[in-house]
Image (spheres, rainbow, N blue to C red):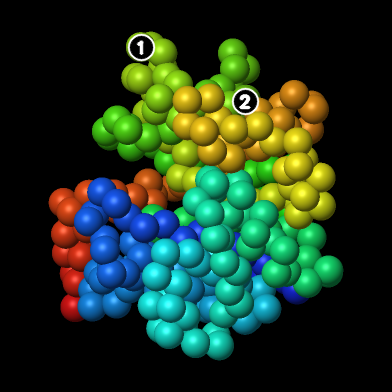
Amino acid sequence: MQTQIENNIATVILAAGKGTRLNCTDKPKVMLEIGNKPVVSYIVETLSGIGFDKDQMVLVVGFEKGKVMDYFGDTVTYAEQTEQLGTAHATCVGMEKLTGDVEHVLVMGGDDSAFYTEETLMHFVDSHTKSGAVLSLLTAEVENPEGLGRIIRNDEGLFVQVLEKEQLSVEQKDIREISTGTFCFNKKWFETIFPNMKQIDGLGELGLPKTVEMAVEAKEKIQAIKLENSNEWFGINTLDELQKANELKNLSIL
């Protein structure tokens, strides 16, 4: 496995969300602090550690964007999502800032990626670029999947769908493999399918899970790669989760 990122790979970090459930009124959700630093700062450091430079790292900003831009300065590239139209829309906005030689794009949330290791991300990107897949998704098996999107596999165990919590049947709610929301895309493929993307039923937004559906319908190659350590994905959606993430980060830096 390679130890440094290639020049034809870039990353888009979604950092435009307000964080309504966390009562964020004066700063974006990704700027809430754990271990005395903004949540999103950890993934930027990790990506920098494996060789992503300013031109290869796009932060998609929106709500209180100045707080993010003041913190990172000119160490990353910025794209502004002026309307909250979903994660796929934010990804498209971010990709527009990338240079023409980029072939593959790693996409992740700035609010749930603080615990990813360099090794995990390198393995994920390496697996994607070697596979020939138009889309790769990082998944995790968790004890309590309630409220999270689930990974649907067919009878042969092949990954075929991501269902949001609002779309699950009673039986599907027992599935413990969840989507981390971290994707790798073939950039040209994503840009080709995005104009034809429809909103996710019941959510009214252009969400990244739709890309899986579109790839399957077109019989394109996709893959799901499960985290070896599911604790590396840590969603922060409640004050309790924020407190736990803070405790874990403080423990890791002692």
Q: Is residue 167 depicted above or below 70 in this figure?
A: above
Callout 2 secondary element: strand
Q: Which mark is residue 170?
A: 1
Task: Determine the secondary structure under disc 1.
Answer: loop
Judging depth in this view, the residue of 254 and 61 nearest the camera is 61
Q: Amino acid at mark 2?
A: Val
Q: Residue 117: give x, y in percent of width and height.
A: 44, 64
- Residue at the (34%, 19%) spot, across then down: 174
Q: Is residue 41 visible?
A: yes
Residue found at the far bottom of this picture: 74
- In the rendered image of this protein, does residue 251 appear above or below residue 148? below
- Residue 160, labelled with which disc? 2
Q: Is residue 154 left or right of residue 229?
A: right
Callout 1 crowding tier (Cα within 10 Å): few <14, some 14–19, many ≥20: few
Amino acid on which the number 1 mark rests in the picture: Val
Residue 116 location, quadrant: bottom left
Q: Is residue 18 left or right of residue 186?
A: left
Give the x, y percent position of residue 55: 67, 78
Q: Residues within 10 Å of mark 2 (few under 14, many from 20)?
A: some
Q: Split into 4 quadrants, where in the image is the N terminus?
A: bottom right
In this picture, is 169 found above or below 180?
Answer: above
